[in-house]
Image (tube, rainbow, N blue to C red):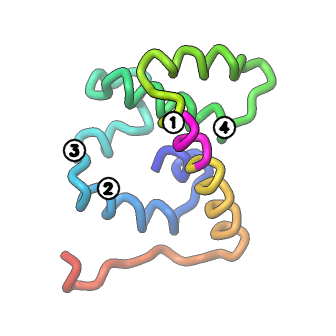
Amino acid sequence: MRVSQINGCRTCLSIHAPAARKAGVEELKLDLLPTWREAEVFDGQERAALLLAETLTVIDKAADRNEIAIDAGEYLSAEQISAIEWTVVLINSFNRISIASNHPVARRQAADS
């Protein structure tokens, strides 16, 4: 969700926010996601994952990606870091395709409520 927020992909957000709720993600965490750096509701593992996601989404030449990966290793295994990196790359791709194609907001059916 954070990657889609950064990229402004309304379609992906309209799909993934309900999916996150259904999967049991706390509503408070979804509400505070844009402010994850300041919100004390995110644990170290979640913060490491969000930092990786933002670093791969907003390419900042000043960011030391090696240092970020090393720091993430304090909370995440190498396999988890790899999974997050590939997921972020994939979501960034989906966001760009969806935005370029002007996909609409996905509205839930009444039966899904």
Name the mark on residue 79. Answer: 1
Identify which residue, 60 or 79, lies in the foreground: 79
Q: Is residue 73 above or below residue 92?
A: above
Local packing at callout 3 (Cα closer than 10 Å; few below 14, some 14-19, many 20+) is few
Identify which residue, 68 or 82, lies in the foreground: 82
Q: Earlier in the sequence, mark 2 or mark 3?
A: 2
The residues colored magenta run: 81-86
Q: Is residue 83 above or below residue 19?
A: above
Q: Earlier in the sequence, mark 4 or mark 2?
A: 2
The amino acid type of the residue labelled 2 equals: Ala
Q: Kindly give the residue lying farthest to the right in the view shown.
A: 61
Residue lying at 47% horizontally and 26% vertically, measured from the top left = 48
Q: Is residue 70 left or right of residue 32?
A: right
Residue lying at 72% horizontally and 70% vertically, measured from the top left = 100
Name the mark on residue 20. Answer: 2
Name the mark on residue 56. Answer: 4
Callout in the foreground (1, 2):
1
